[in-house]
Amino acid sequence: MEIFPQTDVQVLTVEKTNTETDGEYHVILLDDDAHTYDYVIEMLMDTCGHTVDQAYKSAVEVDSAGFVIVFTAYKSKALEVRDSIHAYGADWRIPTSAGGMSAIVEPAELFD
């Protein structure tokens, strides 16, 4: 009597990525006109763990330079933070704000 019948088994191979060997990645916040300074400050405190002072400085820089590095981590964490920024939602202070801010993830080595 066979307890476990022979079956065709498909093995799923998962490529291990997003480890320390991937290096560090920056989360870069992009400027827009659909979010207030207050929104940016609150969002950075919630998504990136910034202090009020850090978040304010980042809000000023994104407004003046068009972008600012807001978080640096290994790839998996950087992607998680980027997704949290995108999902943060619209700025209730601006009626035309339709959603979260834009952010991208880039290898930190590109900024050395």
Image (cartoon, rainbow, N blue to C red):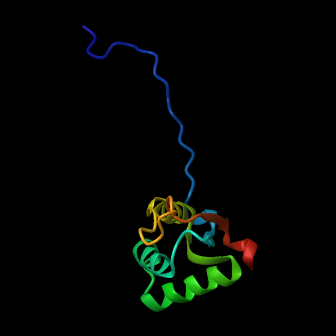
Name the residue at 75% across, 72% down: 110
Query: Where does residue 89 sit, x and y in percent of width and height?
Result: 44, 62
Quarter of the image for residue 43 reads bottom left
Vertical comparison of 41 with 22: above or below: below
Quarter of the image for residue 67 reads bottom right
Which residue sits furthest front? 95
Q: Quadrant of the N terminus?
A: top left
Query: Where does residue 83 sit, x and y in percent of width and height?
Result: 50, 59
Name the residue at 49% across, 65% down: 85
Vertical comparison of 42 with 80: above or below: below
Vertical comparison of 24 with 12: above or below: below
Which residue sits furthest bottom? 53
Depth check: give the residue in front, 97 or 107.
Answer: 97
Q: Quadrant of the C terminus?
A: bottom right
How many labels were placed on the picture?
Answer: 0
Query: Where does residue 55 sit, x and y in percent of width and height?
Result: 49, 84
Name the residue at 62% across, 64% down: 105
Vertical comparison of 106 with 72: above or below: above
Name the residue at 48% across, 61% down: 80
Query: Where does residue 53 sit, x and y in percent of width and height?
Result: 47, 92
Depth check: give the residue in front, 76 or 106.
Answer: 106
